[in-house]
Amino acid sequence: TANDIDSLRQRLIAGSIQVQQQIILQLADVGNEGLDVLMEFLLKRRENPATWIDGKAYQVLYGSDAPQAQEFLQNNFPEGIVTLKSSCGINYNPLQQLLAQQDFQAADLLTIETMCEIAGPMAVKRKWLYFTDVDSFPSDDLQTINQLWIVHSEGKFGFSVQRDIWLSLGKNWDNFWPKIGWKSGNNWTRYPNGFTWNLTAPRGHLPLSNQLRGVRVIASLFAHPAWSK
Ligand code: UYC
């Protein structure tokens, strides 16, 4: 009823993050009125940087086949809810779409490919990065990639999430790998099928960076000035 919807609307605005997450799921199940509340919610919050709660609301609309939802997104958020800033002319819309669809495996691949593209034609050809490539990445681009991952993963995935875990472990790599599910005992997790491509994964599990050539690339990533502001 209209009353129930209004109560959901109130709790969506005022509730804790856990409550908001619950309400968004409920609103997804009550048809057009529920979608209307989600649209209003996103519009009201659009002046502020998107959080993963905005990401949840956006993903419900993105995945809905209601024409009004599609029209709303087209008119108000044609490029998603994260500002897709780039200092090197990269279009992050394909990455935002894969993440909005929760296709974490394809998004992970595209993230690696895009980082090679940032590094230049040599890296694109080689298909992997030197740590010196990472040192000179623009902060704008790293922040965009990172925000896209965070906003579309309930805050679980992203380089800065990984970095926070690594810092909390006193920068100890041996403790870091099992913590994010990249190693178990003496065994490295096997690419691609050993990894968990959904939100049941441990915090910091994605995006991947291959350790075949050592830790210097990921160490450069964590040392990047993009995370210090
Ligand atoms: N792979 O094991 N990985 C690949 C990871 C290692 C290996 C790609 C991550 C350990 C080989 C990605 C881990 C290792 C290839 C990742 C992991 C190893 C490959 C595709 C846990 C052997 C084939 C993109 C740390 C003991 C490609 C890319 C090649 C690929 C990711 C083997 C994303 C996070 C040390 C043989 N692994 N990788 O980079 O270059 O190729 O031969 O990390």
Image (cartoon, grey):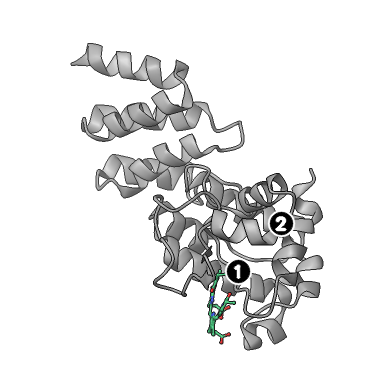
- How many numbered dots are placed on residues in this image? 2
- Badge 2 or badge 1: first in the primary sequence: 2
Residue 34: x %, y % from top left: 28, 29
Q: Nearer the viewer, mark 2 or mark 1?
A: 2
Q: Is residue 48 left or right of residue 52?
A: right
* Res 158 seen here: yes
Q: Is residue 211 left or right of residue 180?
A: right
Secondary structure found at label 1: loop
List the residue tagged with mark 2. Answer: 172
**Which residue is at the far front?**
185
Query: Type of residue at label 2?
Result: Asn
Ligand 1 lies in quarter: bottom right
Q: Is mark 1 within 8 Å of ligand 1?
A: yes
Q: Quadrant of the N terminus?
A: top left
Q: In the rendered view, tell whether residue 77 sits above or below residue 47.
A: below
Label 2 Cα crowd, 10 Å radius (few <14 / some 14-19 / many 20+)? few
Q: In the rendered view, tell whether residue 188 sits above or below residue 102.
A: below
Residue occupying image coordinates x 36% and y 19%? 9
Q: 192 or 108: which is nearer to us?
A: 192
Residue 146: x %, y % from top left: 62, 53
* Res 84 seen here: no
Q: Is residue 24 left or right of residue 99?
A: left
Residue occupying image coordinates x 31% and y 34%? 25
Residue 8: x %, y % from top left: 32, 19
Give the Cα distance between marks 2 and 1.
17 Å
Residue occupying image coordinates x 57% and y 46%? 82
Residue 190: x %, y % from top left: 46, 74
Secondary structure found at label 2: loop
Q: 23 or 1: which is nearer to us?
A: 23
Query: Type of residue at label 1?
Result: Ser
List the residue tagged with mark 1. Answer: 209
